[in-house]
Image (spheres, helix red, strand yellow):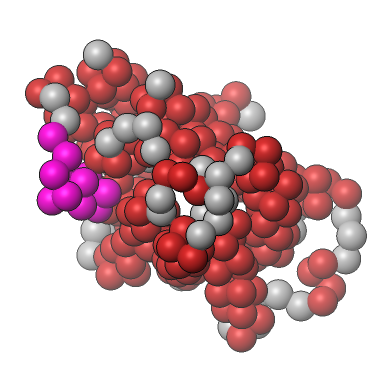
Amino acid sequence: MAALLAVLSSLAWGTSDFMGGVTAQKANAWTVVIIAQFVGLFAALALAPMFGGQLTWEATGWGIIAGISGALGLVALYHGLATGRMATVAPVAALVGAAIPVVVGVVDGERPSNLTWIGIAIALPAIWLVAREESGNLRNGLTIAVAAGAGFGFFFVFIASAPDSANLWPLVPARMGAVPVVLATALVTKQVTSNDFVFRRPVYLGATLAGGGEMVANMLFLAAVQRGLLSVVSVLASLYPAVTVVLARLNGEPVKRTQWAGMGLSLVAVAFIAL
């Protein structure tokens, strides 16, 4: 069940990223991110009570720390992409974000089976290949890429540390911690103005779908990690770039041979981990 939920979370994250990317082509990308962040908060507030659980101080603390970590990762990612370092930032951030929970899980005493380890070993290069869209100097933007990946990776670690009895409630304080970081960064760095938020139906609809999809992905991930190993669940969830690439291809965008190879390896990895 944990593996299935993790794969579903990767599908939701990949779809959300695709919707966010398509919408960002029609508007300021930061505008889309901010709207999506608020939509995710409202979605968490609406859905979390349906699954029961109790929001304790411990769950709140882990949620806030996780949300801030994820938001800092997002800010670092956008800074890297905005400075023309996509060739390094995207694949390194994806790889580091997947690797950190594996290391933390093993240090914490998790012991996946041999077949699962083979799947993890295949999944990590698969994530790199799928996320790498173009050639470039690996050193260009490496620091900011690692920072972005660390933010995402520790989001997985921190949100997984919340007590299972809280069910999905930790995602509410997580988003409450993330929204101010993203909003403050956008305003201080003058990435958005009031004109960017003038209502345009396609933009608000796309951002709403992206934000709602992301929160569903978060919920599926949290449900998965409450039922399985962090080291395994985080790797399966991190395969989401493959979903984004497939959707982009269906939308008429070209896919490089290395990305096709990465998607093939992703399927092999899922098969090994699910055995």
Residue at horizontal 57 percent and vertical 29 percent from the top: 247
Residue at horizontal 25 percent and vertical 22 percent from the top: 273
Q: Position of residue 26 (x, y in %)?
A: 75, 53
Q: How many marks?
A: 0
Q: Give the dominant element type of the magenta stretch: helix, strand or loop.
A: helix
Quarter-of-image position of residue 198: bottom right
172 part of magenta stretch: no
Q: Position of residue 17 (x, y in %)?
A: 56, 44
Quarter-of-image position of residue 263: top left
Residue located farthest toward the bottom when viewing the structure as drawn: 188
Left or right: residue 225 versus residue 244 is left
Of the pair 260 and 115, the residue shown nearer to us: 115
Left or right: residue 48 versus residue 136 is right
Q: Position of residue 132 (x, y in %)?
A: 35, 44
Using the rendered image of the protein, determine whether residue 49 is visible from the camera's viewpoint: yes
Q: Quadrant of the N terminus?
A: top left
Q: Quadrant of the C terminus?
A: top left
Residue located farthest toward the left when viewing the structure as drawn: 114
Using the rendered image of the protein, determine whether residue 82 is visible from the camera's viewpoint: no
103 part of magenta stretch: yes
73 w.r.t. 274: above or below: below
Of the pair 259 and 206, the residue shown nearer to us: 206
Of the pair 51 and 214, the residue shown nearer to us: 51
Residue at horizontal 89 percent and vertical 60 percent from the top: 199
Residue at horizontal 13 percent and vertical 34 percent from the top: 111
Of the pair 6 and 63, the residue shown nearer to us: 63
Quarter-of-image position of residue 224: top left
Q: Position of residue 27 (x, y in %)?
A: 74, 58
Q: Which residues are magenta?
A: 100-111
Left or right: residue 18 versus residue 47 is left
